[in-house]
Image (cartoon, helix red, strand yellow):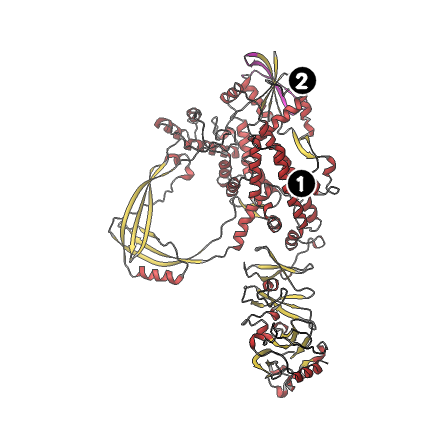
Amino acid sequence: MRTILMVAEKPSLASSLAQILSNNKNTSRKGLNGSCSVHEWIGTFKSSQAKFKMTSVCGHVMSLDFNSKYNNWDRVDPVELFMCPTEKKEATPKLKMPYFLSQEAKGCDTLVLWLDCDKEGENICFEVMNAVANSINVYSNNVTYRAKFSAITEKDIKAAFNNLGVPNENEAKSVDARQELDLRIGCAFTRYQTKYFQGKYGDLDASLISYGPCQTPTLGFCVQRHDQIQTFKSEPYWIVQVNVKTSDGQDINLDWQRVRSFDKEVANLFLNICKSEKTAKVLSVISKEKSKVRPVALNTVELMRVASSGLGMSPHHAMQIAEKLYIQGYISYPRTETTKYPENFDLMSVLKQQQNSSEWGTEVSEILANGMNRPKSGHDAGDHPPITPMKLASRHELDADSWKLYDYIARHFIGTVSKDCKYMSTTSTFDVNGETFSVTGKSLIDPGYTKIMTWQAFGKNEIVPNFKTNENVAITDCKLTEHQTCPPDYLTESELITLMEKHGIGTDASIPVHINNICQRNYVNVTGGRKLVPTTLGIVLVHGYQKIDAQLVLPTMRSAVEEQLNLIALGRADFQAVLKHTVDIFKLKFQYFVKNIDGMDQLFEVSFSPLSASGRAFSRPDYLFSRCGKCRRYLKFIQAKPQRLHCPQCDETYSLPQNGKVNLYKELKCPLDDFELLSWSMGNKGKSFPFCPYCYNNSPFRDMKKGSGCNACTHPTCPHGLNANGICSCIECEFGVLVLDPSSSPKWKLGCNKCDIIIHLFEDAQKIMIDDEVCECGTQLVTVKYVAEKSKFPNQAMEMSGCIFCLPEFNKLVDKHKAIASRPKGRIFRGGKAGGRGRGGRGRGRQPKDKMAQLAAYFV
């Protein structure tokens, strides 16, 4: 008599299968590992009597890992993880699963595998086969069999038992490839960035800064939406709103055919056109019968979407409940991409099971009485049938969450075999002095499937206005309403699932795991409505990857890998070739990432405090500075050397002048880019000038070098630039100009925009203005104002004009001792080109020779 060893994926599943296959005549005992029971009975196999032993594993028997010496984070360079050897280790050493299986397999001659019918299940099949290979010759013909089933019902299980197949090695290899890729890539990046950043920052609020080939693109979708929200600029728009009264006294709001106008003057023009009329003429009244189509059959992705958006469950939690309902026999296998029932699927018997329900039995009876509709044709992915209720359940049998999920699955199934919802849509079109308006109302004809899926039913306040063609109806109100465009909201879990499915990130089984991971690892927070709001850490990570190598976070890279893995599963790609090619690509990306890690580190600096400052709060002026000209949000000031500004929203960093103090400059803005100006100073006796953060890093003119302030900007009309504040050519350097620093009040000073020469002048003056007139020495004349009590002019004059070098009254107020003594050189500033005039042609050319000597003597 043959002895058959049967292995299921979970102990509870093994118990259910044993009861069905033995007709409840099995005996049970505890296995050697104490966790998995063994169920035994005598039955028939291949027309011969046989002894059966049914047991189980607890998920994967083995897991992939590096050799022990490569698990030391401190001694192993992460780049080695792309080439180092790997090995299969026991997934749960405490269970001693390989030993348990090999012992139970002794004396058996046949192996039947009842693992879950997906790729992971196929992979576990071969793990079980390897565990029992010393006891059963599993690789011989007619020794190892694979049972394929989609529901834990007597009919499905016995049908699977009578139609056994063989394990699919290609699908198992595709899982091996995914495991190895995720291990090598994930561990290399995770180890490197965790060690790098946790050694520098004390408030990361994450024990592990992980990278995952699927996890990171999943996070990327959330951060992308966050960036869209932060950079969104609201715009006002206006709508012409017209209200009319029906013959039965209803006040109806009409929809404007132009919808809206972003120009208020144009909108007012249309408003005045409409206001001149007291009535609106009905141009047409058109009624059409329309349908709200019943849903296609339910697959995993749609179940997770609805669980999140409608039932308030995370996808991960929903799939755990679905797995439990499946094992208990209430629903079919919950992991499927298919939305089309097989032609031989017995829909009628499934529907009849539900007619005794106290919740929806009446509706089911009506469907059976009037005739069941064939479900809409969906997508056949070639895996399991759609998710279907397999036996009737009641509220008191299940816990609250299990009932909510079962309730939806059952109602969805009943909805697929119901009629479409039918309604009459009536649209009335109006003319108001040439402008067209309309109103649409709906009236229900047949609720169809919405009678069972009540959340999709029509609202009770649906109104169908009663109008007649060519009728004139009174206008009761005509006004202009103002509105604002709104940014998109944060992604919901449901929307994220849709994006992941669309871009091929993860599988129906792994999608909830990836979403759960980014939540557990503090990359996103789940807020009301199951919205996913990225944390600072999540945002910084994604922006960092984008800055170094955008492909690390884009979905395209992972979806391309998934395509290759699917080709392995289909037997159309070589396992080793795909593995080597993908590992080589990510190794190069890793090396580039390490080389350019400073790009990500700059973002961490602005978001987290160093270990030495951990726990110390910063006041607002310490970190919020001028506003960004692009997004109008505050830039962050990084005091660490080199000091710089960073815009978290635009993800851009701006260098600053070093070794001095940077302050906000009167909240004035650069006319070129709308950035708020700053002032840089090395103190009262040192250099200073105002500057635009953007122009300082991105020179707007060819003759303005990068790293220049407003004192070197040749904008023709800007009041902060060289053409408005230049005084004369510098006598120290060849091309410099002495420029007034308007931010230095009340201790005014001139500074050369090329060299270090400084002249202090007119201390405590209220205002210094540079005139259009030029002294014969080539220096711009200035007008100086004092308040009465601080005036330093003769007879307490409050205002005087003249040349700072030639006017005696001015000369004594210019502190020549603070200037840098030097002798003049052969050429003076020529406006950037030889022979050119001064600032914008206003007269600052070459100094007269006699004046050169005079200025030289003055500075000495």
The answer to whether residue 316 shows anywhere in this view is no
Outermost residue on the bottom side: it is: 795
Contact, CB < 8 Å: mark 1 with mark 2? no
> Could you tell me which secondary element the residue under label 1 belongs to?
helix
Q: Position of residue 837 (x, y in %)?
A: 58, 76
Report which quarter residue 59 is drawn in.
top right
The answer to whether residue 703 shows anywhere in this view is yes
Which one is nearer the viewer's eye here, 443 or 228?
Answer: 228
Which one is nearer the viewer's eye here, 536 or 802?
Answer: 802
Is 524 located above or below residue 168 in the figure? below
Q: Which residue is mark 1?
A: 187
Amino acid on which disc 2 is placed = Lys
Is 492 located above or below residue 703 in the figure? above
| Left or right: residue 238 compared with residue 635 | left
> Could you tell me which secondary element the residue under label 2 belongs to?
loop
Outermost residue on the front side: it is: 834
Mark 2 burial class by Cα count in 10 Å: few <14, some 14-19, many 20+? some
Residue visible at 33% across and 58% down in the picture: 478
Tell me, yes or no, whether the highlighted magenta stretch contains residue 560.
no
Q: Which residue is mark 2?
A: 106
Q: Point out the stretch of residues depicted in magenta.
A: 23-48
Cα–Cα gap, marks 1 and 2: 39 Å
| Left or right: residue 296 compared with residue 581 | left
Tell me, yes or no, whether the highlighted magenta stretch contains residue 46.
yes
Q: Position of residue 560 (x, y in %)?
A: 56, 40
Amino acid on which disc 1 is placed = Cys
- The first of marks 1 and 2 along the sequence is 2
Is 215 located above or below residue 417 in the figure? below
Judged by depth in the image, the label closer to the viewer, 1 or 2, is 1
